[in-house]
Amino acid sequence: GQNIDQPTEMTATEGAIVQINCTYQTSGFNGLFWYQQHAGEAPTFLSYNVLDGLEEKGRFSSFLSRSKGYSYLLLKELQMKDSASYLCAVRDRDYKLSFGAGTTVTVRA
Amino acid sequence: IAGITQAPTSQILAAGRRMTLRCTQDMRHNAMYWYRQDLGLGLRLIHYSNTAGTTGKGEVPDGYSVSRANTDDFPLTLASAVPSQTSVYFCASSDGGGGDTQYFGPGTRLTVL
């Protein structure tokens, strides 16, 4: 099984940078995903890491260290529309996802 | 292209009633999934199907059943609803395998009284 931990809440100012950490313990690691979920909406895919290192996609970057069971999602140049929950999910060898409880990010003007 | 649709959008149900949540995808994805999302617990997998004709149990399968008669549809049935099944239910689909991504439907908000 998977044990996935991420902070419950974070607050940041518009234009700033926020880093959301995710730690996991897994019996069979096969990739890590980050999803964004606005209140009352479905989760939407942000990023995927299966090898160690940094994946950059515009204002969003995701980092993975498999040996440390650690990932982070970096949100740069924060905008008000980035206020949402960010979900860390670990995939096992059967291609099933286990999700963390999510981190609610509030962006203030 | 609609992607994934779910019905109903929301439902209030008396305890003990039977209820089927519908999920349809038009992306010809092999794999489909049902999750429930509860405050503070995140998304938890109920049942999944890797391909039409096969299903499997997830983390919280008790009280739920699924079927996968074809590629597009993956209904979730609550045989006799209980208040603890009050939740938001999301259906998702993916190509299956490799670096594939799960895409989520809009969700069904279910309240069992």
Image (spheres, rainbow, N blue to C red):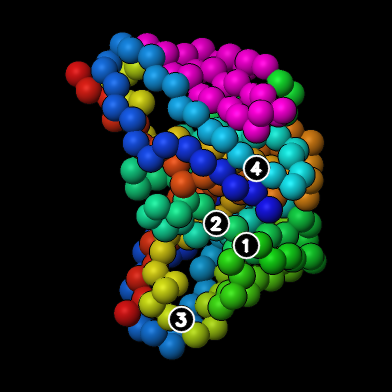
Q: Which residues are magenta?
A: A53-77
Q: Earlier in the sequence, mark 3 or mark 2?
A: 2
- Which chain contains the residue that carries disc 1? B
As helix, strand or loop, the secondary structure at mark 1 comes to loop
Q: Residue at x 66, y 28 (%)?
A: A68
Label 3: state its secondary structure. Answer: loop
Residue at numbered disc 4? A25
State the mark number for residue A5: none
- Residue B32 drawn at (x, y percent): 67, 54
Q: Nearer the viewer, residue A39 or A96?
A: A96
Q: Position of residue B37 (x, y in %)?
A: 46, 56
Mark 4: few/some/many CA within 10 Å (<14, 14-19, 20+): some
Q: Marks 3 and 2, how far apart in space?
A: 18 Å
Q: Nearer the viewer, residue B83 or B66?
A: B83
Determine the chain carrying the residue at label 3.
B
Give the residue drawn at x 32%, y 18%. Answer: A79
Amino acid type indicated by mark 2? Arg
Q: On the image, numbered disc 1 is attached to which residue?
A: B59
B3 relative position to A104: left or right:
right
Residue B95 against residue B46 in the figure, above or below:
above
Estimate the x, y position of residue B60 in percent, counting from the top left. 58, 66
Question: What is the CA distance from the residue labelled 2 to the residue labelled 4?
Answer: 17 Å
Q: In 3D space, how far apart are the residues under numbered discs 4 and 1 (Cα atoms)? A: 16 Å
Q: Which residue is mark 3?
A: B81
Residue drawn at (74%, 39%) of the image: A29
Q: Quadrant of residue A39?
A: top left
Mark 2, mark 4: which one is toward the viewer? 4
